[in-house]
């Protein structure tokens, strides 16, 4: 049971690159869980590994999260009572806590050189055993004794601080997604907590911060599951109560391979560039690994908050289906307000050099064409014949087939002569008019419509022809008909 007022969760990215779609899901689940339980959602920057730091990554990640509507109550960009929220500003703190463990005997000094560690690994490899720090054969507080350890420290010898993992015990914890997890101490490395430069490792900083920031639920990717027994041991070493853990399933490509750059777009910025709505990306991503237990697929932001629960997060890897995401984006495009969309694409349309971009007109075009595209921005190219004065070049083979069709030329000559606002007053009037033009040329009206569409729009597919012609208006149709009729057969 979750005690509502108690919930404090955190999203803890490392600034090693742009925001990955899997990280967006982790952030989103933390956010939804916090909002669902009227709790607090914290952003913490885990930049202990300075060698992997990427300039600008923090700002980009925060911007992508903001775009997706994931907001934080505490964090480096908003402040809060538990700061600083960037780990590189907390290094002294980790050192103090690390030393506390040396003093209470749950961590120890180790003086091994890089060469000694390499040799140890080689010995283990030759013996066919998994590499793991072998406390009993290496140079540490236990093998050297207290006096020698002290002497080396006084001398300023290079050293790290390692966690003393019990070798004769099973570490158990409960995971809200995976159930009970048991790992034997023998399988866990004596994790380095403080490096030789005095900087903390992820494990120490992560546990110290989760405790000090009073985190109640750690919701993170499955790749951190193997680290959790170490974290449990750290909580025990400090005498702290561990939070509840929930490890989220991996995101997979449709072929079940791990989602990575090699397989397509995986950064949130890629999805933004492609033109997805934040609402549809968030809606889709929320369903990758969680299911509402009903058939409902389209969820508003508030509906997601109301429906989300960790109990319905699945253990199995979640397939990220780009086609399903496209479908969802198209659904959002069909449902939204055309005027709002018009405002969003007007600057682009202006930049594309179009002339017919009055807001009301653009909204009408969006209403007409949105069933046929996946992205709002595609309206600009798909509807070029409605926004512009001129038309793109038509495929010459299609064009010549049409220009040599005498009946069609006759029908369209009648069409050109009779086209008026009156015949465009409604769909029936237009249909009657078109039929009469076809009849004059001895054609079936059905056979005239597609060529007429090509002549007027230079495309063979599009919305209802009446709607298209009505939006174009008489003045813009006439020169297009002339352009066709003037071509010598
Ligand atoms: N800094 C880790 C990451 O990059 C956070 C892992 C955790 O949430 O504990 O994903």
Image: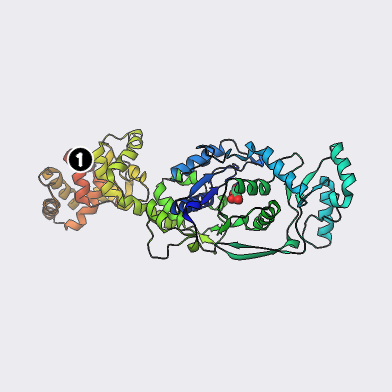
User: Where's residue 302, x and y in %?
Assistant: 38, 52
Q: Which quadrant of the view contains residue 157?
A: top right
User: In the rendered view, how is the structure colored?
Assistant: rainbow
Residue 80 sits above or below residue 282 on the image: above
Q: Which residue position holds label 1?
A: 482
Which residue is rendered at x = 52% and y = 37% of the image?
79
Q: Nearer the viewer, residue 354 or 190?
A: 190
Left-right relation of 366 to 73: left
Which residue is rendered at x = 34% and y = 35% of the image?
347
Left-right relation of 176 to 379: right
Which residue is rendered at x = 28% and y = 39% of the image?
387
Whether residue 475 can be seen here: yes
User: Where's residue 101, x and y in %?
Assistant: 74, 48
User: Where's residue 243, x and y in %?
Assistant: 59, 55
Q: Which quadrant of the view contains residue 76?
A: top right
Residue 187 sits above or below residue 376 on the image: below
Q: Nearer the viewer, residue 427 or 215?
A: 215
* Mark 1 vs ligand 1: CB below 8 Å: no
User: Where's residue 404, x and y in %?
Assistant: 24, 49
Left-right relation of 239 to 330: right
């Amino acid at each position: 049971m979750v005690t509502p007022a108690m919930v404090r969760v955190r999203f803890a990215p490392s600034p090693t690159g742009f925001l990955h779609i899997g990280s967006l899901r982790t952030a989103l689940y933390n956010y939804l869980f916090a909002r669902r339980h009227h709790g607090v959602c914290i952003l913490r920057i885990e930049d202990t590994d300075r060698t992997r730091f990427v300039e600008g990554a923090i700002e980009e990640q925060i911007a992508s999260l903001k775009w997706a509507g994931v907001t934080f109550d505490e964090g480096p960009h908003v402040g809060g009572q538990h700061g600083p929220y960037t780990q590189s500003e907390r290094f002294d703190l980790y050192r103090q806590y690390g030393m506390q463990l040396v003093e209470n005997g749950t961590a120890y000094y180790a003086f091994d050189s890089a060469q000694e560690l390499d040799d140890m690994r080689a010995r283990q490899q030759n013996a066919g055993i998994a590499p793991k720090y072998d406390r009993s054969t290496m140079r540490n507080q236990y093998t050297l004794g207290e006096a020698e350890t002290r002497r080396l420290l006084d001398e300023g010898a290079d050293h790290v601080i390692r966690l003393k993992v019990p070798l004769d015990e099973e570490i158990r914890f409960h995971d809200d997604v995976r159930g009970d997890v048991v790992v034997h101490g023998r399988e866990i490395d004596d994790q380095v907590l403080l490096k030789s430069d005095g900087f903390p490792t992820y494990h120490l900083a992560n546990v110290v911060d989760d405790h000090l920031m009073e985190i109640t639920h750690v919701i993170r990717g499955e790749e951190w599951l193997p680290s959790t027994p170490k974290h449990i041991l750290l909580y025990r070493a400090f005498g702290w109560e561990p939070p509840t853990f929930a490890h989220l399933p991996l995101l997979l490509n449709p072929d079940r391979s791990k989602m990575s750059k090699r397989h397509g777009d995986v950064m949130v910025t890629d999805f933004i560039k492609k033109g997805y709505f934040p609402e549809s990306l968030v809606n889709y991503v929320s369903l990758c690994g969680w299911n509402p237990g009903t058939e409902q697929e389209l969820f508003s932001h508030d509906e997601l908050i109301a429906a989300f629960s960790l109990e319905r997060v699945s253990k199995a890897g979640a397939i990220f289906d780009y086609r399903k995401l496209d479908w969802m984006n198209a659904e959002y495009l069909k449902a939204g307000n055309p005027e709002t969309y018009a405002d969003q694409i007007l600057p682009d349309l202006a930049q594309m050099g179009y002339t017919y971009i009055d807001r009301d007109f653009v909204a009408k075009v969006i209403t007409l064409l949105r069933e046929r595209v996946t992205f709002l921005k595609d309206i600009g190219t798909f509807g070029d014949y409605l926004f512009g004065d001129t038309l793109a070049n038509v495929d010459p083979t299609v064009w010549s087939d049409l220009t040599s069709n005498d009946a069609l030329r006759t029908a369209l000559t009648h069409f050109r002569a009779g086209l008026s606002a009156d015949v465009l007053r409604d769909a029936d009037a237009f249909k009657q008019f078109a039929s009469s033009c076809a009849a004059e040329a001895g054609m079936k009206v059905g056979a005239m419509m597609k060529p007429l569409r090509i002549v007027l729009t230079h495309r063979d597919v599009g919305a209802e022809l009446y709607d298209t012609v009505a939006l174009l208006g008489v003045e813009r149709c006439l020169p297009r008909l002339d352009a066709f009729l003037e071509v010598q057969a």
